[in-house]
Image (tube, grey):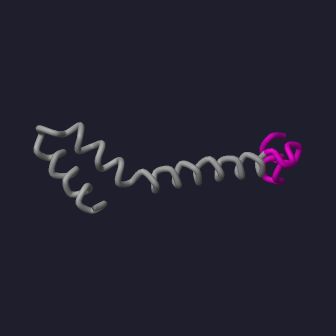
Amino acid sequence: MGKFLLCLGIILIFSGIGTGVGIFLVIFYFWEDIKKSIGNIDATSRNNLSEKNSNPKYYNEDTAEEMR
């Protein structure tokens, strides 16, 4: 049933008559993947943020040399 909704959505998108409904069907088909990718983006940004803030007084030797 899922692939049928995807195909029907694609047909409606390209037909021009049911473009809105077709976009909704395609988004509905990929909704779980979209939620997982949004969750991974949030987790990745939190990890990167905690790594960047782990030691704010540290400067790389090259950076410290450029700042002089």
**Quadrant of the snapshot with the C terminus:** top right
Q: At x 70% / y 50%, what residue is drawn?
A: 48
Q: Please state the total of marks drawn on the protein image.
A: 0
- Inspect the magenta stretch and tell me whether residue 6 lies in it: no
Compared with residue 61, is residue 20 higher up or lower down, i.e. above or below?
above
Residue closest to the eye, 41 or 34: 34
Instruction: Report x, y in % for residue 40.
Output: 59, 54
Foreground residue among 54 and 68: 54
In which quadrant will I find the N terminus?
Answer: bottom left
Residue 46 vs residue 67: left or right? left
Q: Among all residues in the image, which is located at the extreme front?
A: 1
Q: Is residue 46 left or right of residue 16?
A: right
Residue 12 or 51: which is nearer the viewer? 12
Residue 7 image offset from top left, x and y in percent: 21, 57
Q: Which residue is drawn at the image coordinates 53% and 48% (left, top)?
A: 38
Q: Is 60 in the magenta?
A: yes
Q: Which residues are magenta?
A: 53-68
Identify which residue is drawn at 38% across, 54% down. 30
Residue 55 lies, in percent from the top left, at: 87, 48
Q: Nearer the viewer, residue 42 or 20?
A: 20
Q: Where residue 57 appears, x then y in whole percent?
A: 89, 43
From the viewer's perspective, tell me whether residue 67 is left or right of residue 42: right
